[in-house]
Image: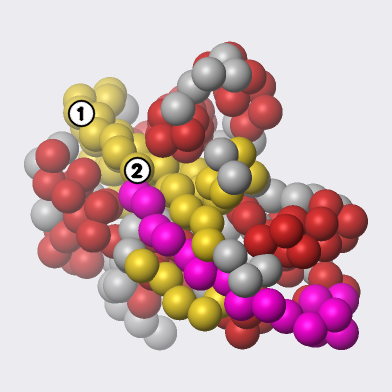
Amino acid sequence: MTRLVLASASPARRTVLRKAGIEPYVHVSGVDEDAVQASLGPRAEPHRVVTELARAKAAAVLPALPADVVADAVVIGCDSMLLIDGELQGKPHTADVARSRWRSMAGRSGILLTGHCVIRVRGGVAVGEASDDSATVVHFGTPSGDDLEAYLDSGEPMQVAGAFTLDGLGGWFIDRIDGDPSSVIGIGLPLVRRLLGEVGVGISELWSASPDPA
């Protein structure tokens, strides 16, 4: 049976996959994202940045996976960043940065880019790879001062790309999106389906490899 390996610590990505019938084998890549982005140079196109970060994450976990997993698996790496005012924004990490970003983007729109890379593995060897990114327009609402401070106090925006979530507390402050909601959450199911097809894996193969619900 083909196993799906998720090279991410994101609970949101795991939840998307589980709700779609797949229990992923999770192995966090530990990739230095800043170093990867710096290696691409300051002129790298935003789409290339997120896709190369996704590729780096997927490739990094391969050597550490157990033999029984890499006997027949697909490894998926993802990376999301918000493009606004021509600048890519990742995780803010601090409340001050998140506050500044929200004050800037409230009432405006940005593009959430999510890079995806799928590596097909058989017998411990990578035999195929496909990658691409998705772009979804996010229209931000304008939270009140009190609501913004409460959101910052929750800690949620500091650990997510663009300082917002669609499926969490931040969803209250998103007016609408134009595009794929699962991609905004962190892993776009339509794009992953296409990439899996490019490396010769059908969705139903991954359903059968997932444990039965308890």
Residue in the image at 51% along x and 69% along y: 139
Q: Which amino acid does label 1 sit on?
A: Gly
**What percent of the width, then of the height, locates residue 18?**
39, 71
Number of dots carrying numbers: 2
Spatial CA distance of label 1 from label 2 is: 18 Å
Say which quadrant the C terminus sits in.
bottom left
Please tell me whether mark 2 sits on a helix, a strand or a loop.
strand
- Residue labelled with disc 1: 128
Q: In the image, is residue 148 above or below residue 101?
A: below
Q: Is residue 148 left or right of residue 74?
A: right
Please tell me whether mark 1 sits on a helix, a strand or a loop.
strand
Res 133 label = 2
Mark 1 vs mark 2, foreground winner is: 2
Crowdedness near tag 1: few (<14), some (14–19) or many (≥20) residues, C-alpha within 10 Å: some
- Whether 19 is among the magenta residues is no
> What range is drawn magenta here?
134-149
Residue in the image at 35% along x and 43% along y: 133
Q: In this view, does 115 lie to the left or right of 53?
A: left
Res 155 label = none
